[in-house]
Amino acid sequence: MNFFGQLLTTAINKPPTTEKLSNHRDAISRILGIHTDIFVAVAFSSSYNDAKWLNARSKVRELISNIFVRGVQDIMLVIRKVCKALAGSKEVVIPALAMQKQMWIKTYETLQATDVDGLRTIISVVADASHLDLLNEKPFSPAFHPLKESKEVAKACEEVNDSLVIIHGGFLGAMSKYANAHDSSSVLDLLRCPGVVKNITKLMLSPVGNLQIAAKNLVTQAFDVDVRLECFRALLENLPDASLEGIFDFLEVFIGYSPLIPEACSLSQSLVRCLTDVIEVLCSSHDGLLRSHHFLNPVGRVAPTAELPKLWSLMTRAIAVIFKRTPSWSIYYESEQMIEWMRDALIFGRDMLAQRRVFETAVAHTEQESSSPNVGKLSSVGRTMVGDLQEVLPELARWLRLTDEELLHQSFSLLQSLLDCFRESGIPPSPIGINKLVKHIDDARKGGSSRPQTRLDSSRLAKLEDSLVSFVADDDEVEIISHSIATQRETLTEHKGVKSTTASGKSAPSAYDSKQATTKFPKPSTSRLPTASVQQRQGTKPSLSAPRKFNSIPSVVISVPKRRGTGPKYEGAVVTSPAQESSSDSESDDDVEPLGGIAALAKFQRSPKVKRPAERRQVKILDIPIRKYKSLVNRDSVRNSGLAFRFKPDISPLHRIILSWDYDHKGPEPPVSGTKPLLVHVPDQFTDHIQYCRVFEPLLVLECWAQIVKSKDEATDSYPITITSRQYTDTWLDLEIRITDSVKKDWYLAETDIVLLRDVAREKSVLAKVRSYTARPWAVEAGLRCYFALDTIEPGLHIGSNWRLRKVFR
């Protein structure tokens, strides 16, 4: 039996690299099929549980385990081959799938409820296939792929599904049989065996309902919990290392597997729902594990928070894959089906981004960074986490073309939160992400364009434009060298590969010119073709343009002065030629069309001809660093689209002044340390901006203090609060609070509110500004921002401390 088992194991595990070896494996498979009953009986039946069968039983179990593992690997191999065939590969040979289906069925039937080792073996094998749901037949049907191999592809798809049905079918029954025969302590002993919790966690993340239920039943019985969220809490709280390892394995498999197949909607749906539960377990302001001292400082083992950066990185990569691939997946489903799970994906992205600071604070707590005196700076872990979000931004921009209003609203809200995260951290988004967003704005401003338009209305477009202003550098300038031109129709000739442009507005042929591909949601585009670009400044108001991507940037500036007479005026045309941009993303929608600045030159042909003596034109090559040039392009683009005129002023200095005041100070003037601001008469005219600020800033500060003094005499509602989280952002102290008492129906907090936090027992009070407000059925949660000058001491705003809150003024 030993020799026969080793022979079979070797034959099964060795890949069929030659026809002879393939025939050898087929012969072995036929032998196994004939003798399946005896093999399974020796391995798992109670009749062969004697000592004399111990050695043979061990070898046959090893053989069956290898057969099952190899069967799962063969399923994956066939799926990869089928996907390559659908992608157009002409030399793909789809192997036949030789699954020992009868052996799977007999094993599930024979496995004893007391056989812990056999159960561990089955759990391990099935967990390796936990991400494999039944293949959707539509993407593999000849109707979608009219290839001569379509019948072979459809047959392989059917064989894969039949095999998966067998693997999934009996697993729930085997697990239920074990759970019904044991108490909670025995099930907990099973979970504590090496590798079991990791595999159970993978099964709970599975898109297959039977696998999820089977794993959940074991956790439910072991820890006396009920719903899926509580199951994840029990695993992460009691066995965190193995649970996180299972989540890591599943996320890595998802990131590699989901772009491979035509669609992975069910897998993505299961993933985002389960990870939303995981984030709630870790970061909940009420009882999140990352807010628990016992979880962050375990006794006798290493804190699991060291793995949090890896978890964050994998989650951001996973959500980026989902945002990127969903447009191509959506063509195989009805809109109602897609809307349901896409909403779940947006909820996951929102929750993950909202809890970024909780992740960072937990890691900093373990590394003892939170006690650092330089609390205003973003930690190294925080910078890494914000950097991980870079690839999410351009993929999320795809969803701005959704037609469902609710999904579009959720997508835009998530995008705004993502941009706020970059702005608050001081880390600018990648040029790819900025270019995509500016392109959406550019498309929306061109009403007559035949290309797909963003679905954002004007108000949301304005908000998006205002958000992009924050990432534009204002200190980059380019030198303009002015010269005269001979006639209105004189040509801007080509210089060092720069595209030639005539005064009539027509462009000379260029190697970069190509047709543009359209992108429609849900069906993605299949190409990205660059075009030449020309940027022009007209008078003091820049013309509409959008930032473009360059692999190499020729620094050529051709400048023309303002013309006299009746013709249109322009000042300084910058002519550049982009390099061909290569892209691995065949579904990107970064189409680039010629800028409107070229059309502006056409106006010269309608001007009267004025003959002037020709003067020598000059070309000056500027050595501008690429990084500085890109910043210049972004700045001009945002300004050209009208963003600068709607730029919101930075009033954070005013907030610092107000929040640094002592509320209990008495008197008509605010408590100001040092020289008091001088009040002067308001003049009829102002010479400059400095004079305007010097006159009105003291008046504004005095008015704010008068509002605070007035609030002391007014009776307002106050509510007890508990501080659930705190972290430093730059020079601010950001707090998360919870109000568990019932509040009045019309009571709420707005982002413009200034509130008072008071500790009556210690006679302490702090002014704070509202950052966010959420009313939930069981509590009210809010985010506050405080400021303390360098010479003041924080009055004990610790996590878990109790204060009373009331509104002061708006």
Image (spheres, helix red, strand yellow):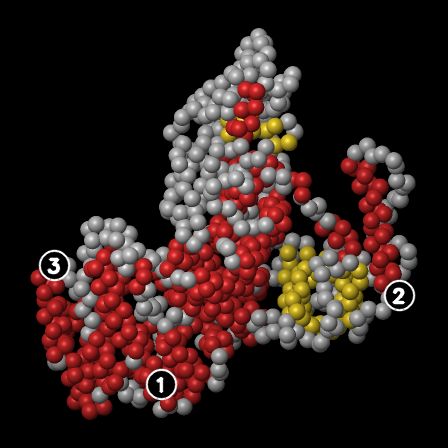
Label number found at residue 391: none
Which numbered disc flags the more N-terminal residue, 3 or 1? 3
The secondary structure type at the circle numbered 2 is loop
Q: Is residue 333 left or right of residue 630?
A: left
Residue position for label 3: 18
Q: Residue furthest left?
A: 20
Amino acid type at mark 3: Thr
From the viewer's side, name the closer residue of 275 and 4.
275
Residue position for label 2: 713
* Residue at 90% from the left image edge and 40% from the top image edge: 681
Callout 2 touching callout 1 (CB < 8 Å): no
Amino acid type at mark 1: Ser
Q: Is residue 364 left or right of residue 332?
A: right
Q: Residue furthest top?
A: 613
CA gap between label 3 and label 1 equals 43 Å
Residue position for label 1: 176
CA gap between label 2 and label 1 equals 67 Å
Query: Up-down: is 109 above or below 494?
Result: below
Which numbered disc flags the more N-terminal residue, 2 or 1? 1
Mark closer to the observer (3, 1)? 1
Q: Say if residue 137 shows up in the picture.
A: yes
The secondary structure type at the circle numbered 3 is loop
Q: Is residue 73 left or right of residue 502?
A: left
The secondary structure type at the circle numbered 1 is helix
Amino acid type at mark 2: Asp
* Residue at 48% from the left image edge and 85% from the top image edge: 224
Q: Quadrant of residue 158?
A: bottom left
From the viewer's side, name the closer residue of 202 and 547.
547
